[in-house]
Image (spheres, rainbow, N blue to C red):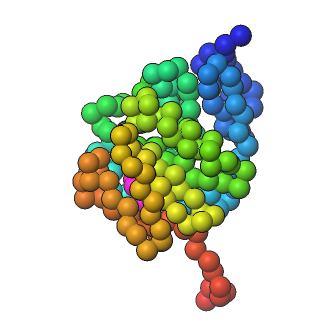
Amino acid sequence: MSLTVKDLEAVQAKLGSDYRVELVDGRITVMSPSGYESDEVAFRFGRRLADWVEPNRLGRVTGSSAGFTLPDSNTRAPDVSFVKAERLRRAPRSFAQLAPDLMVEVKSPSDRLEDLESKIANFLAQGTQVGILVNPEDSTVKVFQPDKDIITLRSSDVLTLPDLLPGWSVAIAELWSPVFDEEPEP
């Protein structure tokens, strides 16, 4: 039996906000909350992206609770996503019925790299222009685009996406969780 978006919504309503769920190939996958560091890294990425996108009215930036029903009928939720304004004039109350222009996955301790890369490949096959895999474990950021080589960036590098977000950039080192070695001054 293949499940539908309505089934997904019913499961999500029963589980509440403690769990994220996705519909992949007619099966519902329940995902536990992410690790603290990976969520902080996703927030830092999303904040830097939104700080550029919103004042320029370029589109919408969302976090891991925003689901997308893709053309293949899978409903998935990246950790961070961006959709151009002209593709999504109003925010839908339910899942967006399109692939985001940009999607970001941040590896948490329970994630397998192969699964994240497969998820990114699925989004790219459904129309996403750029997929990004952020890995706090080895301090790398991989940029995936259809028909292009994968680009691997390290902490000393700067991420730019000139074809999608001209003028935007983020230093990779700014994405990582800070370490507070000293007590803050009162």
Residue 65 rendering spot, x and y as whole percentages: 58, 40
Dominant SS in magenta: helix
User: Where in the figure is residue 186, as x and y percent of width and height?
Assistant: 62, 88
- In magenta stretch: residue 160: no
- Looking at the picture, does residue 15 appear above or below residue 47? above
User: In the rendered picture of this protein, how many numbered marks are placed on residues?
Assistant: 0
The magenta region covers 46-50
The quadrant holding residue 156 is bottom left
Q: Where 54 falls versus 74 (above or below)? A: below
Q: Which residue corresponds to the image point at 63% horizontal and 80% vertical from the top-left? A: 180
Q: Nearer the viewer, residue 38 or 150?
A: 150
- Residue drawn 49% across the image and 59% down it: 141
Q: In the visual, does 63 lie left or right of 164?
A: right
**Residue 136 visible (yes or no):** yes
Residue closer to the observer: 17 or 99: 99
Q: Residue at x 61, y 53 (%)?
A: 107
Look at the image and tell me in which quarter the N terminus lies.
top right
Q: Is residue 51 left or right of residue 119?
A: left
58 relative to 159 in the view: left or right:
left
Q: Nearer the viewer, residue 114 or 40?
A: 114
